[in-house]
Amino acid sequence: MRLHTMAAAIGLTLALAGCVSTGGLQPSGTLTEASSLKSQRSLDRVPVSPAAWPQQDWWTALGDTQLDALIAEALHDNPSLAAADARAQQAQAAAGVADAERGPTVNAGASIAGARLPGALTGNDSHFAWAKYGYASFNWGLDLWGGKRAAWEAALGEARAAEIDRQAARIELSTNVARAYTQLGYAYAQQDVAKDELDRATSVRDLTRQRVNAGIDSQLQLKQNETEVANADGQMAVAARAIDAARSSLSVLLGKGPDRGLDITRPQVLKPSELAVPGNLSLDLIGHRPDLVAARWRVEAASKDIKVAKSEFLPNVSIGAMAGLLGMGGGNLFSMKNRFFEAGPSLSLPIFDGGRLRANLSAKDATYDLAVAQYNQILVGATNEVADTYNALQSMQTQIEAQQRALAAANDAWKLAEQRYKSGVGNYLEALIVRQQLLVAQRHMAQLQSQQVDLSVQLIQALGGGFRPQSEPAQVAANTASPTDRSL
């Protein structure tokens, strides 16, 4: 008879479930297929290599041991990494809480209190007595529809995303250190050219002053030369400030005070990475870009949250039990007559809640759509970022080759001007004017080489910075079906 009664109760609750319905609510976001993002024509001139993905210690290929030490120091001491670690720990703790919610709870307690009980309650005169109480309880909410498991899986997905964010923070930090270090090297190159230009401009001014005193040149030419000297002084100050700024940036990235930057010596000439492209760029990026992997886990977590919200529309069954002892006065609490207990299942069903459950489900649908949109945006941006950086590096290589020809021509012109002066055919002033063209070419070459190394580092970051996920992207993709295709 009891089984028939329970079955009837469950049938009734299922029939009443229509009072609060999920009808008409579903997410609309659709994940972009990586294979639909074509990049073959944009990268048709780039060699294909399966080894194009960066190594985890990619910075060692740049060829500067000081840079290797600086990146190691930053990865150890930068405070922003501690914040990323804390966020990952928070997410892991939240997953632990969600996992604990799936199991039963057992509690126990005891109390003793003195009270004067009214005669109307005891049937006797009012008097003081001790009330002693002890109990143990058991409660287990059955996860009939998988809502608690889905909540745990959602929290676990967020924890995985936070862990990947922690790795991404380290990759971003290492690339920022390399880029700041590149700027420091360029600032020193600027200083070299600025010093040579100041020496040249000063020599031209002194020669012009002699020619003015001899009545050969005019004051106009002298003033023009003095302007060049002043400009060269200004360029020296600009270069010195660029060195200070790069050192300051490195001090911040290292998590140290400004004096730390003063100990950083002049960088060596860095070697840019070789130009190559993975065979299946858009598809393989999913497993090599930490922001893409983290975004995919967040889509998965959002889909699980929808399942949790849907389970709240359905009947909830829990099993509970309690046993204890309750005694009054000074008698023995552990007497058999003081014991009590209760046990049995309980049912709950939302019938009318003012629209709270539907609003909550609608919010979860929107969260899923947002996670999908963010993933799609990152995927499209990542694919185009890689292609654009490759094309920029190709263009930079062409510019450097052209500038090398210009630099060689300017150097030859300077040598010829020196030979003419030493042969008595030309004067030294003319030679110094020719040397100005050489210094301009050297400054431009230093700028292009610095940009080439910086773009090389950007490319490494665009290709994932050596990220190696613990979970395969295919597994995440398989688990991330549309919530509308899933049953509770």
Image: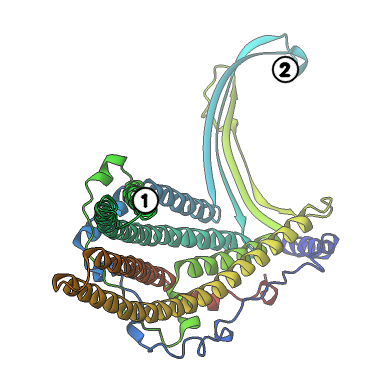
Estimate the x, y position of residue 116 in percent, counting from the top left. 66, 12
Gap between marks 2 and 1 measured at Cα: 121 Å
Identify the residue shown where x is 41% and y is 87%: 46
Residue 15 higher or lower than 77, as above or below: below
Determine which residue is flagged by label 2.
122
Relative horizontal placement of residue 473, taking residue 213 as reference (left or right): right
Pick the residue in front: 15 or 85: 85
Res 183 visible: yes
Relative horizontal placement of residue 106, taking residue 141 as reference (left or right): left
Q: Quadrant of the N terminus?
A: bottom right
Identify the residue shown where x is 42% and y is 61%: 168
Where disc 1 sits, the SS reads: helix
Amino acid on which disc 1 is placed: Gln
Amino acid on which disc 2 is placed: Thr
Determine which residue is flagged by label 1.
219
Residue 457 higher or lower than 48, as above or below: above
For marks 2 and 1, the one nearer the N-term is 2
* Residue 375 picture quarter: bottom right
Residue 322 higher or lower than 118, as above or below: below
Res 311 visible: no
